[in-house]
Image (cartoon, rainbow, N blue to C red):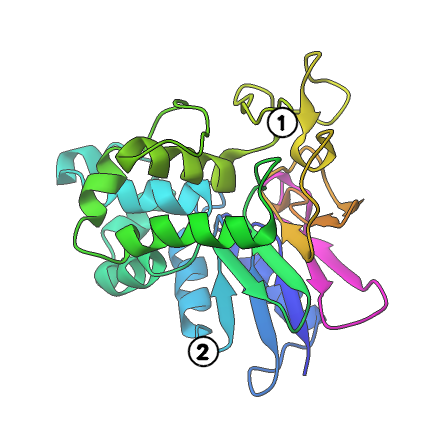
Amino acid sequence: MAVWAIGDLQGCYAPTQRLLERIAFDPASDRLWFCGDLVNRGGESLQTLRLVHSLRENAVSVLGNHDLSLLAIAERSHADQRRVNPDLQGVLFAEDRDVLLDWLRQQPLVHVDRALGWMMVHAGLAPKWTTQVAEQHAGEVEATLRGKSYRKLLKNMYGDRPNWSEGLKGLDRQRAIINVFTRLRYCTPRGRIAFEEKDAPGTQAPGLYPWYEVPGRAERDLKIVCGHWSALGLFLGLGVHAIDTGAVWGGKLTALRLDSEALHVVQVPGKDA
């Protein structure tokens, strides 16, 4: 048995197939952890989503910002859906769209295996969040997305404000939680996210830190694997394993084995630039 985490697919079906072949994935015994952003930009989002859905008994995927965006767009009018890129339209107007989107909406913001010693998120954690606190906050949003009021949340999900605060309530609180889990790269020591900063460390404005380097951050009892930040590339340090290596931008698609004591990284070429 092997457990592999895989970076952002973003609709890159052919590279995903290549990577599964390269790691000799065996659905009879192996497990896959997908770091979110299964769709958008790669041109093969429908095929990619169908593939991951077909592996659902052997795989888990956390929700990324592009996955949530797809779910939100699916609740809009057909006229609005016709305005998005053809890659997402392929999902929105597929005959099995309801099956795929209902499954996607059930996916978590955080996946934890304490026996294995790993936590998976799409983007990152707020500076003061322990892994236990992160699970609790993720559970708040997951319960809404899986419940009857999910449409209200998807409609009101967008926005850079408010900054995360424990005292937040209602949709403001859930929006702030989603922003941390799916959009975080840089933040201040107090947790204010710098949404406009997306480039590699060293380019950010003074007073901002990569989320995993914030002074005074919480101690965390699990290793963390994540994606989202393609400009960061492969980063392995400080208990964090960032594996979005820009497959959709002509980079590589990365898999990291989680059940091995030795560091085992496998990469294949991504989408042709």
Labelled pair 1, 2 in contact (Cβ < 8 Å): no
- For the residue carrying disc 2, how many other residues have a C-alpha within 10 Å: few (<14), some (14-19), or many (20+)? few
Q: Quadrant of residue 24?
A: bottom right
Which amino acid, by three-letter code, is at mark 1? Answer: Tyr
Residue topped by disc 2: 57
Residue topped by disc 1: 186
Q: Is residue 28 above or below residue 142?
A: below
Residue lying at 27% horizontally and 41% vertically, measured from the top left: 72
Using the rendered image of the protein, determine whether residue 239 is visible from the camera's viewpoint. yes
Spot occupied by residue 120 in the image (x, y as percentages of width and height): 58, 56
Residue lying at 45% horizontally and 78% vertically, measured from the top left: 57
Label 1 and label 2: CA atoms lie apart by 34 Å
Residue range of the region highlighted in magenta in the rendering? 248-273
Q: Is residue 233 above or below residue 239?
A: above
Spot occupied by residue 134 in the image (x, y as percentages of width and height): 52, 49
Q: Which of 112 and 50 lies nearest the eye of the viewer? A: 112
Q: Quadrant of residue 173?
A: top left
Spot occupied by residue 33 in the image (x, y as percentages of width and height): 57, 64
Q: Is residue 209 above or below residue 220?
A: above
Q: Residue furthest right?
A: 262
Which amino acid, by three-letter code, is at mark 2? Answer: Glu
Spot occupied by residue 82 in the image (x, y as percentages of width and height): 22, 37
Residue lying at 72% horizontally and 48% vertically, measured from the top left: 240
